[in-house]
Amino acid sequence: MNDFNSAYWKLTKFLQNFIGVWPYSSNSNDKFKRIMIYMAMYSLAVPVVLKLIEEVESHIDIVIENVFGELYILIVLMKYTMCIINSNKKIYKLIRKHWTMTTDNEELHILKKFANVGRLLSITYAVFCFSVGGSFVIMPLIYPLLNYISPLENTTRPLQLPIYVQYYIDPQKYYALLMIKICVTSMFSVVVCIAHDTAYIMCIYHTFSLFEIVILRLQRLADMCYDIETSKHSINFDYKVYHRIIKSIDLHQSIIENIQCIEKAFTINLFITVIANTAATGGGLFVVFMKLSSPIDLVRYGLFVTVISVHKYFMFLPGQTIINYSLLVFRLCYACRWYNFSLKCKILIQIMMARSQQPCYLTGGKVFILCLETYSALMKKGISFFTIFVSIQKK
């Protein structure tokens, strides 16, 4: 893969082009697209804030619901802004370089395998987000649909918008217009999230493939050392071992550089998303608790809580996987029978051992490490928020 026109990157490239943040785009309309996205997000954020202020002393459930609506919009704006500022161009250059660094069929197979897994996960994630996001905003249309299919005798079911907003116009009279506006802006927000997150998925799975190649090279080194023990080696055998260690060290250093680039590009977004997600876990459970008497809203917000819980898990899982891979590289360095190497080869493998002893990891804003231990702690914190909200409501 010498460019990003392959099937692996097709979805991410299309979505980032659509919202005007693809780093290799020469489209003159990108600035216009960016202005439109920002206008759409702020046109949704302001009415939500106005409604929040209006209800702050009367309906705590609406206030909490709108607070987390604002958090979602903040996350979308942050993801979009960071896509523009960072542009991911350095990461993409490294990915292109890695695809040209080897001609080994087994190593190329690993690169293609993980790129394909990343592509399939990206497609699954996009379908999941569009399905849940679409369901969340469209489900309130069930009420006017029921009014048409099965009207009540002396009254009609109230027309309900997907979110609480204040536009200072009659929401019943302009219901269709408001629904279209909210649906369109909501789908824009979903596209921004998918474009950002699928790029993250593809970069992460590319990193996994590099770790797998390093592991393959270390396993081959172990096999070569077995040949040394059994005296099945030629005169230039030491040169081959030396050359393979050099290639392994170079790739391991490239992995570290790649992870540092991912950290720089995504760490702020990861921090804000995780903090907002933790708070939204408690807030979402509280809203579900408040919607027990409304089946449609119960389903909508039940989906919301499920999505943020699954999303949080899959934010932390790649970080844990990177730590696991780093530790595996460290163990394989020790297990490759290095004691059979020549002196200069021993020095090289010791350098790699020393570097891999400190595992690579991703962080959220340099505040916490993305691992399953942190995930468990933050999930407990989110549930504790729920109990706090319930106690406030009872008072």
Image (cartoon, helix red, strand yellow):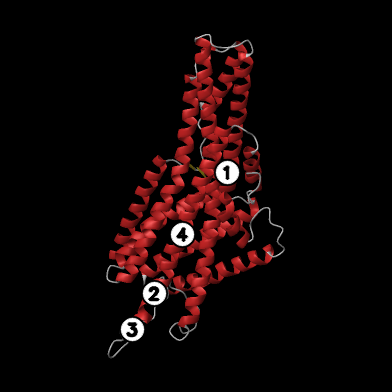
Q: Amino acid at mark 3?
A: Ile
Which residue is located at x 53 percent, y 17 percent?
A: 224
Circle 3/circle 2 CB separation < 8 Å: no
Q: Earlier in the sequence, mark 4 or mark 1?
A: 4
Q: Earlier in the sequence, mark 1 or mark 2?
A: 2
Q: Amino acid at mark 2?
A: Pro
Q: Which mark is residue 262?
A: 1
State the SS at label 1: helix
Q: Which mark is residue 127?
A: 4
Q: CA distance from mark 4 to mark 2?
A: 21 Å
Circle 4/circle 1 CB separation < 8 Å: no
Q: Amino acid at mark 1?
A: Ile
Q: Earlier in the sequence, mark 3 or mark 4?
A: 4
State the SS at label 3: helix
Which residue is located at x 37 percent, y 58 percent?
A: 305
Circle 3/circle 1 CB separation < 8 Å: no
Q: Earlier in the sequence, mark 3 or mark 1?
A: 3
State the SS at label 2: helix
Q: CA distance from mark 3 to mark 2?
A: 15 Å
- Which quadrant, please, contains the N terminus? top right
Q: CA distance from mark 1 to mark 2?
A: 39 Å
Q: CA distance from mark 4 to mark 1?
A: 24 Å
Q: Does residue 297 lie above or below 128 as drawn?
A: below
Single out the mark in the foreground, 3 or 1: 3
The residue where tag 3 is placed is: 149
Is residue 19 in view from this perspective? no
Q: Position of residue 147 (x, y in %)?
A: 34, 84
Q: Which mark is residue 140?
A: 2
State the SS at label 4: helix
